[in-house]
Image: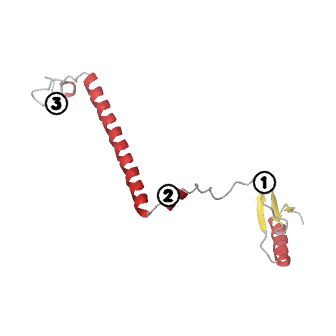
Amino acid sequence: MADMFFKRFVDAASYAKRLARESGVSVKLERTYEEWVVFDPNTLQPRDSQPDLLPALPPRDHDAWARGPLERVEDELARERREREQEQADYDDQKAYGEAIGENTPPRLKEATCEACGRPLSFCRCGD
């Protein structure tokens, strides 16, 4: 049997129940735009247009598993050391950048303060 299309959910559900009872296996029922589709389990084939629900696993490094546990630990420690060195290099770059900005920025002039209230003159309210 081919896939069956229905306009109403009630009709699709009753057909899916009857088909499941007759075939003894579960039947797929899904909505496509404005129709309901009942997939016959006997003719159900994987579709190329549907994306895979599970991501592909990365390839295994068989050489890593062939080595002993000590070599795997050494590999992990080497990776962590490289990460720490990269973080230190990034920190040094950021520090040098900050120092260069500080050297190239003119110092701020400190505004004179009011003797009566102690505020900067631009914020003074006492009128001196």
Marks 3 and 1, how far apart in space?
70 Å
Q: Nearer the viewer, residue 62 or 53?
A: 62
Marks 2 and 3, how far apart in space?
69 Å
Callout 2–callout 1 Cβ contact below 8 Å: no
Q: Amino acid at mark 3?
A: Arg
Classify mark 1: residues with Cα within 10 Å, few (<14), some (14-19) or many (20+): few
* Residue position marked by numbered label 3 in the rendering: 119
Q: Sequence-wise, which precedes: disc 3 or disc 1? A: 1
* Residue position marked by numbered label 1 in the rendering: 33
Q: Amino acid at mark 2?
A: Ala
Residue 68 located left or right of residue 84 = right
Q: Nearer the viewer, residue 90 or 85?
A: 85
Residue 79 located left or right of residue 24 = left
Q: Which quarter of the figure has residue 15?
A: bottom right
Q: Nearer the viewer, mark 2 or mark 3?
A: 2
Horizontal and vertical percent for residue 9? Answer: 80, 65
Q: Which quarter of the figure has residue 59?
A: bottom right
Horizontal and vertical percent for residue 77? Answer: 37, 54
Q: Nearer the viewer, mark 3 or mark 1?
A: 1
Horizontal and vertical percent for residue 33? Answer: 78, 54
* Residue position marked by numbered label 2 in the rendering: 64
Callout 3–callout 1 Cβ contact below 8 Å: no
In which quadrant is the C terminus drawn? top left
Q: Sequence-wise, which precedes: disc 2 or disc 1? A: 1
Marks 2 and 1, how far apart in space?
49 Å
At 81% from the left and 69% from the top, the residue drawn is: 41
Q: Secondary structure at mark 2?
A: helix
Q: Please determine whether, in this image, residue 70 is positioned above or below residue 111.
A: below
